[in-house]
Amino acid sequence: MNILVVSDGQQDDRLLRRRLEAEKYIVDWASDGATAQQLARRHLYRVILLDLALAPRESREFCSSLRRQGVEAPILVLSSSAEEHDEVEGLNAGADDYLGKNFTYAVLLARLRVLVRRGGLSNQVIRAGNLWIDPAARRCGRGEVDIPLSRQEFAVLLRLMRSAGQALTKVEILEGAWDMAYACRGDTAIVAVYVSILRRKVDTPFGRNAIKTVHGVGYRLEIEE
C-alpha cells in the first residue's frame, strides 16, 4: 500500500518511516507542501499523512488545495494545535482525521488502517465521451455496449480514466494499476502490453482512438466528444 508522508524533517522521521514500512506501507516522502501537492497529483495514494509544522490555517489551505485539484486520498493530519475549532475547520477543509502530537504509534497505525479500509477514491461512474467505467460494479462499456475486461485490464483502464485528459508515465500507470510488490520491480513493459489489449477492446471495434501514446512520456486517455 502506498502512502505519502508530508513531514518537515524532524528527528523522529526515521522512526516514523520504520514503523510504516514495518506495516508494509510503501512510503513516499515530501518535506514541503509544494512537493507533496506535486506527488499527490501524480500518484494514487491510499493515505496522505500530513505532519508538517504548519499553522492551523496553512494546514487547512493545504487540504483545501488538494481537494480542489481532485486528490481524493484520505488525509490524516498530525496537529500541533489542541484547539477544537482548528480541528473542526481542518476537517471541513478536507482532512479526514486529526491526531494531536502526543499520539502513540499504535493509535496512529490504527487510524491509518481505518482510513485505508474506508478508501478515498470515488466509486462513482467515470465517463470520457461515450466510454464509461463503473468501479463499484466492475463494469465498463461504450454507450449501451458492455465491454468484458479481465481484472488487470480493468485496473489499467480505471487508472487512465481517473486521469482522463492527462499524460501518465508508464511508472504512474504501473503504480496505480498493479499491487505495490509487483510495481516495485519497475517492469514498465507490461504497461504497453495491457494498453495494446485495451485498444483492441475499447477503441478499435468502435472506430475510436481514445488511448493515445505520448512519446517520451507514456499514455493519455482523451475525452472524446
Image: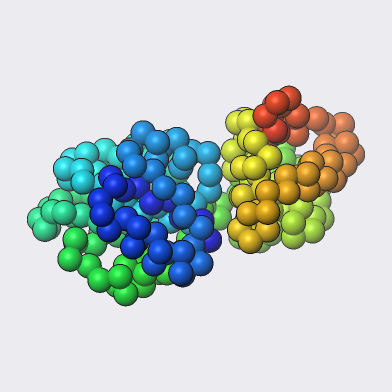
Res 149 quadrant in image: bottom right
Q: Which residue is drawn at 74% across and 56% down?
A: 152
Tell me: 198 left or right of 76.
right
**Is residue 154 or residue 75 the one in the foreground?**
75
Residue 98 position, x and y percent, is 25, 59
Expressed as whole percent of the image width and height from the top left, the position of residue 209 reads: 80, 30
Q: Nearer the viewer, residue 5 or 205?
A: 5
Spot occupied by residue 197 in the image (x, y as percentages of width and height): 85, 45
214 lies above or below 11: above
**Quadrant of the image containing the C terminus:** top right
- Direction from residue 157 to residue 55 in the image, left or right: left
State the residue at coordinates (11%, 58%). Answer: 82
Residue 40: x %, y % from top left = 46, 42
Colour scheme of the picture:
rainbow
Is residue 124 shown left or right of residue 32? Answer: right
Relative to 145, 121 lies left or right: left
Q: In which quarter of the image is residue 150?
A: bottom right
Q: Look at the image and tell me whether residue 197 can be seen.
A: yes
Say which residue appears at 36% left-offset and 72% top-offset: 110
- The reply to whether residue 141 is in sight is no
Give the camera-side residue of 19 and 123.
Answer: 19
Q: In which quarter of the image is residue 139?
A: bottom right
How many marks do you count on the picture?
0
